[in-house]
Amino acid sequence: MSWSRQIHLKSPAELDVMREAGRVNATVLVTVKELLKPGVSTADLNAAAEEVLRKHGCVSPFKGYGHPPFPSSITVSINQELVHGIPSKQRKLKSGDIVSIDCGTVLDGFVADSAFSAGVDEISFEAQKLLDVTKEALQAGISKMRVGNRTGDISAAIQNYVESHGFHVTREYTGHGVGRQMHEGPQVPNYGRAGTGMPLKAGMTIAIEPMVLVGTANTKVLADQWTVVSADGSLTAHFEHSIAVTEGEPRILTVP
């Protein structure tokens, strides 16, 4: 697959549609975050997300995606689960868990994609540091999303920030362009060299998503063929925004 051929520059009108999709996506995540309490099932979180999507006339691009088809509208990944956790009635949140929620929204043919990680009740010092570093790494990446920079500048900023705090970035899962499709070009890994990669142009829209692990960069996929976990069982976190490159400041599309 050639990621460079899949880059679609968005017009101002298209960016406005993506901004509205992003607003709905942010509303979903705010709603789900308020439900992160002990005893709540991950299926309950998915049901709440789907209710918000229905209310706004939207659907999730996650549901039915891939092989085997992903069964839910959001992913819910807990503790050592990095991404792509499948919601379940049997899986209940516990005090001290780190929960990562990823959601996509399709509105008028355009996709917004964002994610956050948060603790359930009180969490450990290490867990809180992990959340803080991952969220700050996202901001470090976003700050490089300017015309004249390259995708490698984003990747290097994320990697350098995470590794300077003693954590690891995944090598196997990446940020990506987003627009009419959930996955467009360019591909933006969470590691790389500054000054390399695709040049950034106004109208590019990219989902930047640091995926950070405490003990190792290595991951494995569970038997459900979706859930990705740290290879050593250590804690993980994931933050993501869909961002537009403009002639000026980066435009965050997935905020309320």
Image (spheres, grey):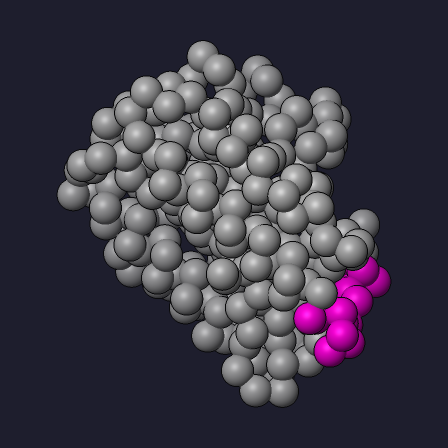
Q: Position of residue 109 (x, y in %)?
A: 79, 54
Indicate whether 148 appears above or below 172.
below
Residue 35 percent across, percent down from the top left: 38, 35
- Viewed as shown, does residue 248 lie left or right of 156? right
Q: Check the image and report above or below for 161 versus 37.
A: below
Nearer to us in this view, 159 or 50: 50
7 in the magenta segment: yes
Between 245 and 92, the residue placed more toward the observer is: 92
On the image, which quarter does residue 82 sit in? top left
Q: Is residue 48 visible?
A: yes
From this viewpoint, which residue is outermost toward the top?
90
Could you tell whether 137 is left or right of 58 in the image? left
For residue 78, above or below residue 213: above
Does 92 sit above or below residue 252? above
* Highlighted magenta segment, given as a residue range: 3-16
Q: Quadrant of residue 198?
A: bottom right
